Amino acid sequence: MRDVMKHLILSPQGAVGLFILVVAALMVCGGAHIAPYDPESISILARYKAPSAEHWFGTDQLGRDIFSRVMVGARATIVLSLLATLMSMVTGAVIGTASAYLGGKTDEAIMRTMDAVMSIPSLLFALLIVSTLGQSSFNAVLAITIAFVPGMVRIARSVSLAARQQDYVSAAIARGEATHYIILREMLPNIVAPIIVEATIRVAFAIMLFATLSFLGLGAQPPEPEWGLMVSEARAYFFNAPWMMLIPGVAIALVAIGFNLLGDGLRDALNPRSH
Amino acid sequence: MTASYLFKRFMLVIYTLLVVSLLVFGITQLLPADAAVTLLGQNATPQALAVVRARLGLNDPAWLQYWHWLRGVLHGDFGVSMRNGLPVAPTIMAALGRSLLLAVCALLLMLVVAIPLGIWAAVRRGKLADMLVSVLSYVGISFPEFVTATLLLLLFADVWQILPATGYVPLTEDFRGGISHLILPSVTVAMILVAHVSRMVRSEMVDVLQTDYIRAAHLKGLSRRRILWRHALRNGLLPTITIVALDVGYLLGGIVVVEEIFAIPGIGRELIVAVQARDLPTIQAGVLILAATYSIVNFLADLAYVFLDKRISYA
C-alpha cells in the first residue's frame, strides 16, 4: 500500500491528479465555510460583475457571487457523481464476479444481456430513466448508476475470470462453502484493486454525465448551485458575461482531469510490469 | 470466417435489439403519467378518457401492449406522437438522416486528426511531442460537450465571427452554408473521441513498434518511413476499428447534447423534446433506433476486423 502511494506520487500523472483532487476534496468538505457570500442570495445592484477583488469569479445574472456558488456547488457535483460510481461499482462487481464464478450458460446469458444493455448510450439511458422518474438530482444519480452497471460488470468479470482459476477458490469449493460465500467473501476482496482503478476513471465520466443532465434541465434544479446547471443558466448571457459559464465549465473539466489522471496513475502504480 | 460465426454474431444483434426493446418499453411503461391524460389534457371528461384508453389499448395487460408495439415496430410503424398527433416514423427517420450526417462528419474529422496524432506520439515516444499529445488528450477527454460547444461558440461565432452560431441548413439547398453550420457541431463531438482514439492508437503503435518483425525490418536496413507505413501501420491500426465502433455509443450520446445546443433538428433534439413532453412513442422510437445503429455498427466492425486480420478465424 505504501509502495503504491510512493509510486503514485512520483509519477507526474498521479501527482497532478492527486493535487487536483485534494483541492476538490477541500472544496467538498469546507466549500460552504470558504464561500465569502451566500450562494443563493440575490443582489440586484451587483449583477453581471466581471471578476474583481470583491467578487473573485464575478457575479451572475441575479448578482449571486460565482466563487461562492462554485465552492458550494462542488459538493453537489462531486459527491453525487462519486455516489453514482460507487453504487454502480458495487452492483457491477457482485454481478460480474457471480457471472465469472458460475460460468457456462449463466455466464453467457448474463454477459450477452449486459452487452445488449450497453448498446444504449449511457446518456440516452440516463435520459430514459430520468424521463420516467422525473427531473431531480437524486434521479439523475440513479440513472447514472444504472447506466454504468453493465460496464462495471464487464470489468469485474474479466478480472474475476483469472481469480476463478486460483487455488483458494478451488479450496473453498472443496470445503463445501456456499456459492454466495465464495463470491462475496473469497473472490470479491481479491479483485477490488483493479475495479477501483476502473471506477476512478469512471468518476470522471460520471461527473461529466451528471453535469450534462443538469445542463439539459434533467438533473439538479434551480436555484441549486450545481456546476452543469450554472453553465446552462449562463448560456443566455455568455456573449456579454462569458465568465459566468467559463468558470463552472472549467471547474467540471478540471475535476474530470483530476480523476482521469489519478485513475491512470493508480493503474501504473498497481501494474507490476511498470515497476 | 465461417458462416456459423456470421450467423451467431447476427443472432447476437437480434438478441440485443430484443433486450433493448424490452427495456425501452418496460421503462417507459413505468411512467407515472397517464397517456390518455397527456393526450386530452387535465380537464378531459372520464368518458372521453375511457374512450382514448380503449383506443390506445391502455387497458390491455402489459405483455399484450408490448406485443402490439413490437409488431408495429417490425412493420415500420412506431405509433403516433403524443405531442403533435403525427406518425412518429417519418419524423424520426428524417431527423435520423440529419443526425447521421453530423455523425459521419464528426467521425471523419476524428479519424483524420486522431490517427496521425497517435502515430506521431508513438514514433516520438517519450519526447516532447508525446508529452504534448498526452496532455492534450487529458484535456480533450475531460471537457463535456456542452462546455466545449459553448467555448467554440464564444470564440468562432462571437469573438472572431467566422462561423454561424446555430441552426441547420440542408446541404442540398446551400452546400457552403450547410457545411459551415456543420463545422462547430462536428468539432465539438469529435473532441472527446479524438482524445480517446489518439491515445489508443498511440498505445497500439507503441506495442507494434516493439515487436520482432519491426526489429527485423530495421535490421534488414529498410528506411524508417517504409517500416512505419508498410509494416507497422497495418497491424497497429487494426484494433482501432473496434475502438472506434465502441466509441460510436459515446458519439451518439454526444450528438444528443450538441444538437440541443446548436439547434440541429436531429434525432437527439427530437428525443430531448420528447422527454420534456413525455411523448412516449417518440422516446421509444428514438432510443430503439439509436441502440440499433450502435449494435449494427459494431456488427459491421467485427466483420471488417475478421476480413482484414488474416490471423483471426472464428470457428
Image (cartoon, coloured by chain):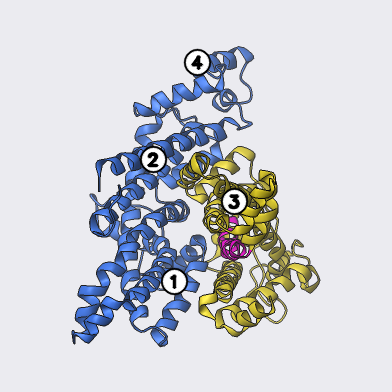
Chain colours: A yellow, B blue
Judged by its main secondary structure, the magenta piece is: helix
Pointer 2 with pointer 3, Cβ within 8 A: no
Q: Is residue A235 above or below residue B20?
A: below
Do dots 4 and 3 share one subunit? no
Lower position in the chain sequence, tag 2 or tag 1 = 2
Which is nearer the eye, A33 or A175? Answer: A175
Q: Position of residue B250 (x, y in %)?
A: 45, 55
Q: Please rate how many residues cluster around mark 3, counting C-alpha atoms within 10 Å: few if below 14, some from 14 to 19, many from 20.
A: many
Lower position in the chain sequence, tag 4 or tag 1 = 4
Q: Label 1, label 3: how many angstroms apart (C-alpha)? A: 48 Å
Give the secondary structure at mark 3.
Answer: helix
The reply to whether residue B84 is visible in this rendering is: yes
Residue type at mark 1 is Leu
The region drawn magenta spans: A193-210
Residue type at mark 2 is Leu
Q: Is residue B221 above or below residue A215?
A: below
Q: What residue is pinned by disc 2?
A: B12
Q: What residue is pinned by disc 3?
A: A97
**Quarter of the image where one finds residue A260:** bottom right
Do dots 1 and 3 share one subunit? no
Do dots 4 and 2 share one subunit? yes
Residue type at mark 3 is Thr
The subunit letter for the residue under badge 2 reads B
Q: Position of residue B14 (x, y in %)?
A: 38, 36
Q: Position of residue B210 (x, y in %)?
A: 34, 78
Q: Residue at x 23, y 59 (%)?
A: B310
